[in-house]
Amino acid sequence: MMKRSRLLPRFLRLSYLLAPLILCFLSISCDRQDPLPEIDLTQSGRTAILEPKPSGDEFQVAVGAMISPHETFIHYRELLDYLAEKAGKSYQLVLRKKYQEVNDAVRDGEVDLALVCSGAYVQGHDQFGMELLVAPMVAGKTVYYSYLIVNKNSTIRDLEDLRGKTFAFTDPMSNSGRLSPVALLAEHGETPESFFTKTIFTYSHDKSIKAVAHGLVDGAAVDSLIWDYFNATNDELTKETRIIHTSDPYGIPPLVVPPGLDPALKARFREIFLAMHTDPAGLKILQTIRIERFVSVDDSLYTSIRAMEALLPGLPAEEK
């Protein structure tokens, strides 16, 4: 079995930080009107944040909260352990609740590597030069979709049936969980405010799935990669939901680096990721998280997302 790299200095002394990380999933925030019921299994409802401590032998990596901290920690630890071992370094995992907070960390050079949502990449690239490193290939493609989901027992069959209902978005910067469904509404001459009775932000796709499965909201927009992953590996929640709409394809969420990252480190990261599927140990990890391989991609892969943003210039930043 592959030797694991040190996750954090003095891991045991920081167990009080990891406890909320492992337990925190499903604190749901409302963006308007009265709050809907919350599921909160933490004492504070706060996502743990592990602050970076710069070191020449250590790199910092951030993961956007596309899935909750508990799931993030479980599913990405082996991948990051592998990267650290191959790079001959240790690493620190930096978690932020909101996509904007991860973009800020990349912009400010607080992290050396980040996995971000496609919408967050587009904004980061255009605002401060966030750079593509590699992207995952899933089922032979480097695209994903936005799913509109409802409870399996719901009578809702299409978008129009969601009129006057409650709806969950993921993050203000999310493409599949915010921008795509808002653009879909715009095609029908509607806005979230005119179409839905209430909307909420869940800040991760698995929380949105859970909100629909438990009947906290009537519908939600979620990342197809995440819904498909859970449906194939642990369908306890997805089996309680039903897909009523699939969007056009979008460029897949990439791994990115800050514009000022040391070129040698950037090249080493890219080399490790691109060769990972050729190493039996690396391939096993990729198979666990249902990624075929990492590939180089061009910024043009995300053109359709920019086109949607251009059609919604008046969409407030807090609601995108």
Image: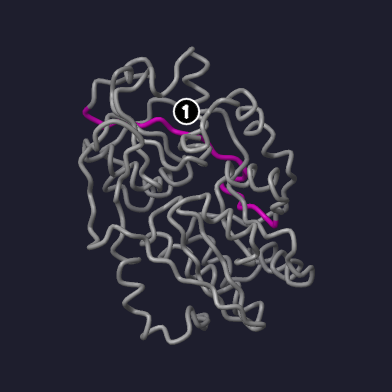
Side of 219 relative to 76 (left or right): left
Q: Which residues are magenta?
A: 133-153
Residue 220 drawn above or below residue 138: above
Q: What secondary structure is the stretch in magenta mostly built from?
A: strand
Residue at image x 62%, y 45%? 140
Residue at image x 30%, y 45%? 28
Residue at image x 47%, y 38%? 318
Residue indicated by mark 1: 181
Q: Quadrant of residue 133?
A: bottom right
Say which element carries label 1: helix
| Residue 102 in picture, x, y percent from top left | 54, 56
| Residue 4 in picture, x, y percent from top left | 50, 81
Along the line of sight, which residue is nearer the eye, 268 or 123? Answer: 123
Side of 150 relative to 53 (left or right): left
Side of 211 relative to 227 (left or right): left
Along the line of sight, which residue is nearer the eye, 291 or 63? Answer: 63
Q: Residue 202 lies in magenta, yes or no?
A: no
Q: Residue 145 lies in magenta, yes or no?
A: yes
| Residue 165 in picture, x, y percent from top left | 28, 23
What kind of residue is marked 1? Pro
Along the line of sight, which residue is nearer the eye, 233 or 127? Answer: 127
Residue located farthest toward the top when viewing the structure as drawn: 189
